[in-house]
Image (cartoon, rainbow, N blue to C red):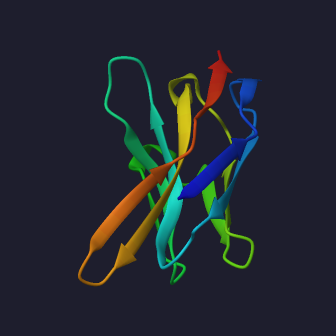
Amino acid sequence: QVQLVESGGGLVQAGGSLRLSCAASGSIFSIARMGWYRQTPGKQRELVAVVTSGGSTNYADSVKGRFTVSRDAAKNTVALQMNNLKPEDTAVYYCNLRSYYPGLGANDYWGQGTQVSVSS
């Protein structure tokens, strides 16, 4: 099994910054990508930013230019630097790890979530 432990959430004023970190441990093989999703009450979980094993990144349009995702493959960690935060960024942020095995497909693993609150 894979365990993901997040840290770094909190309360910040609009325009401020936060950095989220996630460490993966356990039976980790063939990581396809790691990254972050977020969810607010009554809404579906949405992709925020991911980075693939090859280093490619993908961001939600709403965070482009403000958030930066990075990964340390040697340590199996992923971070999300969030700058110029806006009240609409308020959500529970979840770390995600996707593994992929040819012939078996993909598996998604999730952290427990960390609250990010941005006050106006």
Query: Is 21 positioned to the left or the right of 113 in the image?
Result: right
Query: Is 67 positioned to the left or the right of 54 in the image?
Result: right
Q: Residue at x 62, y 51 (%)?
A: 4
Q: Nearer the viewer, residue 57 or 72?
A: 72
Q: Residue at x 36, y 62 (%)?
A: 107
Q: Nearer the viewer, residue 92 or 59?
A: 92
Image location of residue 98, percent across then percent down:
43, 64
Q: Quadrant of the C terminus?
A: top right
Spot the residue most to the left: 103
- Above or below, comparing residue 87 to residue 58 in the picture: above
Image location of residue 55, percent across then percent down:
54, 79
Q: Quadrant of residue 101?
A: bottom left
- Above or below, comparing residue 93 to residue 5 in the picture: above
- Above or below, comparing residue 20 to residue 69 in the picture: above
Instruction: Residue 69: tell me if it is visible.
Output: yes
Figure label count: 0
Q: Nearer the viewer, residue 113 or 20?
A: 113
Q: Residue at x 56, y 58 (%)?
A: 2
Query: Is 20 positioned to the left or the right of 67 in the image?
Result: right
Image location of residue 70, percent across then percent down:
65, 65
Q: Residue at x 26, y 75 (%)?
A: 104
Instruction: Residue 82: tell me if it is visible.
Output: no
